[in-house]
């Protein structure tokens, strides 16, 4: 018992995984595996009205607009004299923006496959 001291959560998780594997094995015998239905998250309006493909396009365009706003904010901060150059470089490092030359930074569009100057 002394060896298990302090490992209560890990031991409980191990027991749950054993129970889940037993349930999975028993469900294989009946060829029916039932998972609980998630009811708390509704389907988005875009998916129900226009389909999943339109929802993906909308999400990517929203991300593009967010990248544009963030880039403009950092450029305004640079003009005011604040330290925003590090934030712009972070955007380039995380591929939310890309550089052309030494000074020209542009927002990246997640909806497009290839962009000029982007990797």
Image: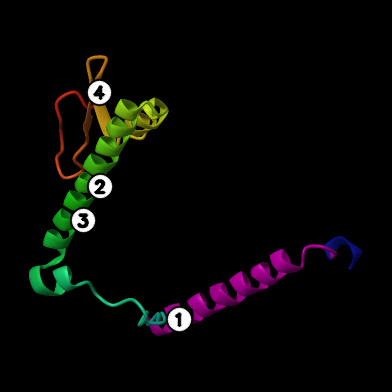
In the displayed structure image, the side of residue 35 where residue 11 appears, left or right: right
Please tell me which of labels 1 and 2 falls first in the chain: 1
Please tell me which of labels 3 and 1 falls first in the chain: 1
Which of 10/72 is in front? 72
Q: Would you call the spot at circle 4 few (<14 residues within 10 Å), some (14-19), or many (20 or more)?
A: some
**CA gap, disc 3 to disc 1?**
37 Å
Residue 93 part of the magenta segment: no
Residue 59 shows which numbered tag? 3
Which of 84/31 is in front? 84
In the displayed structure image, the side of residue 20 where residue 37 appears, left or right: left
Q: What span is colored magenta in the figure?
A: 5-31
Q: Of helix, strand and loop, which one carries label 3?
A: helix
Q: Would you call the spot at circle 2 few (<14 residues within 10 Å), some (14-19), or many (20 or more)?
A: some
Residue 27 shows which numbered tag? 1
Mark in front: 2 vs 3: 2
User: Residue at label 4?
Assistant: 99
Mark in front: 4 vs 1: 4
Marks 4/3 in contact by CB < 8 Å: the verdict is no
**CA gap, disc 4 to disc 3?**
24 Å
Give the percent coordinates (x, y) of residue 98: 25, 28
Give the percent coordinates (x, y) of residue 20: 55, 75
Mark in front: 1 vs 2: 2
Q: Would you call the spot at circle 1 few (<14 residues within 10 Å), some (14-19), or many (20 or more)?
A: few
User: Residue at label 2?
Assistant: 66
Marks 2/4 in contact by CB < 8 Å: the verdict is no
Q: Main secondary structure of the magenta part?
A: helix
Which of 38/118 is in front? 118
């Amino acid at each position: 018992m002394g060896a298990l001291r302090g490992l209560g959560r890990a031991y409980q998780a191990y027991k749950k995984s054993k129970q889940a594997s037993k349930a999975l094995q028993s469900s294989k015998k009946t060829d029916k595996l039932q998972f609980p239905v998630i009811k708390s998250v509704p389907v988005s309006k875009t998916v129900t009205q226009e389909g999943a493909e339109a929802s993906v396009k909308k999400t990517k365009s929203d991300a593009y607009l967010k990248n544009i706003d963030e880039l403009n904010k950092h450029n305004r901060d640079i003009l005011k004299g604040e330290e925003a150059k590090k934030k712009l470089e972070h955007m380039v490092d995380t591929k939310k923006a890309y550089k052309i030359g030494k000074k020209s930074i542009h927002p990246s569009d997640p909806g497009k496959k290839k962009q000029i100057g982007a990797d």
